């Protein structure tokens, strides 16, 4: 799953640590999501979208491989 | 893996310390074949089968409990250390914990299968003894490695 968290986070002027604190996870979790090593749960995805003030489907995009 | 029955973070350091000390003591006991004689005590055995003797059931036997006590302490402290929360628990940490647990189980049984093929007789008894702790130890190693790699 692709995501635009880094771009949106930069637009908002937030560091990974700051975003992590707002959504109540560790900085490592935000880093893993941005690097596409980890797919967040629906709740976490909605929290991130809410903090970055972006629609969830603009923040996360499904890829071909997600359907297998 | 959203477990709600992880032990509190505050016991992590103490349980880890006890685990390391007692595991080293257990290895020393096994390798040097040394036990303190003060721990020769009568114990109630549901089943007891001594070498070249008949198997007895529901009886009192005289045995040294040093090895038994150490093993129990290693198991309990290992479980407390392995399954206590991290300082900050979130879904990614839970995911790493599950990955490490699955890897540890796979690894443990792969090693056991190899041992079945290549180790025999009394030496295999030692394999079974180590197998009591190997899954737990492998899980601790894999999980700690995952945590270090994401820092």
Image (cartoon, helix red, strand yellow):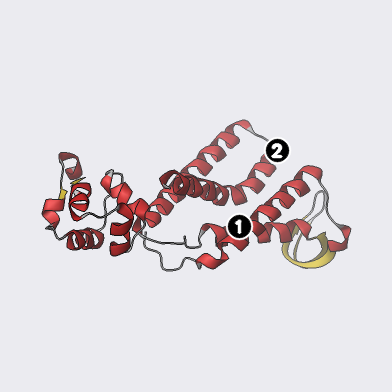
Give the residue at x 53% y 46%.
Answer: B141
- State the image coordinates of residue B144 (x, y, percent, origin top left): 50, 49
Give the residue at x 75% y 59%.
Answer: B48
Q: Foreground residue, B55 or B78?
A: B78
* Direction front: furthest residue: A13
Classify mark 2: helix, strand or loop.
Answer: helix
CA–CA distance in space, label 1 to label 2? 29 Å
- State the image coordinates of residue B125 (x, y, percent, origin top left): 68, 43
Q: Nearer the viewer, mark 1 or mark 2?
A: 1
Marks 1/2 in contact by CB < 8 Å: the verdict is no
From this view, report whether residue A3 is shown above or below residue B18: above
Q: Circle 1 marks a residue in which chain?
A: B
Q: Foreground residue, B125 or A2?
A: A2
Q: Foreground residue, B45 or B52?
A: B45
Give the residue at x 12% y 54%.
Answer: A57
From this view, report whether residue B10 is shown above or below residue A56: below
Give the residue at x 55% y 52%.
Answer: B136
Mark 1 surroundings within 10 Å by alpha-carbon count, few (fewer than 14), some (14 through 19), many (20 or more): some
Of the numbered discs in the image, which one, if any, rests on residue B16? 1
Residue placed under numbered mark 2 in the picture: B123
The mark that comes first in sequence, 1 or 2, is 1
């Amino acid at each position: 799953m692709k995501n635009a968290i880094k771009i949106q986070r930069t637009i908002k002027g937030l560091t990974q640590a700051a975003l992590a604190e707002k959504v109540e996870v560790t900085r490592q979790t935000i880093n893993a999501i941005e690097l596409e090593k980890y797919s967040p749960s629906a709740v976490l995805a909605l929290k991130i979208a809410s903090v970055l003030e972006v629609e969830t489907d603009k923040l996360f995009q499904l890829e071909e491989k997600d359907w297998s | 893996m959203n477990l709600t029955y992880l032990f509190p973070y505050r016991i992590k350091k103490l349980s880890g310390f006890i685990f390391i000390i007692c595991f080293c003591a257990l290895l020393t006991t096994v390798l040097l074949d040394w036990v303190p004689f003060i721990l020769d005590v009568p114990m109630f055995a549901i089943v007891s089968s001594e070498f070249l003797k008949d198997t007895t059931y529901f009886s009192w036997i005289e045995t040294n409990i040093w090895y038994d006590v150490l093993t129990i302490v290693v198991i309990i402290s290992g479980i407390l250390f392995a399954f206590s929360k991290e300082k900050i628990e979130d879904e990614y940490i839970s995911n790493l914990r599950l990955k490490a647990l699955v890897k540890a189980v796979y690894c443990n049984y792969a090693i056991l299968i190899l041992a079945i093929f290549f180790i025999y007789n009394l030496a295999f008894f030692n394999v079974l003894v180590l197998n009591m702790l190997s899954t737990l130890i492998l899980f601790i190693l894999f999980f700690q490695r995952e945590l270090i790699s994401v820092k």
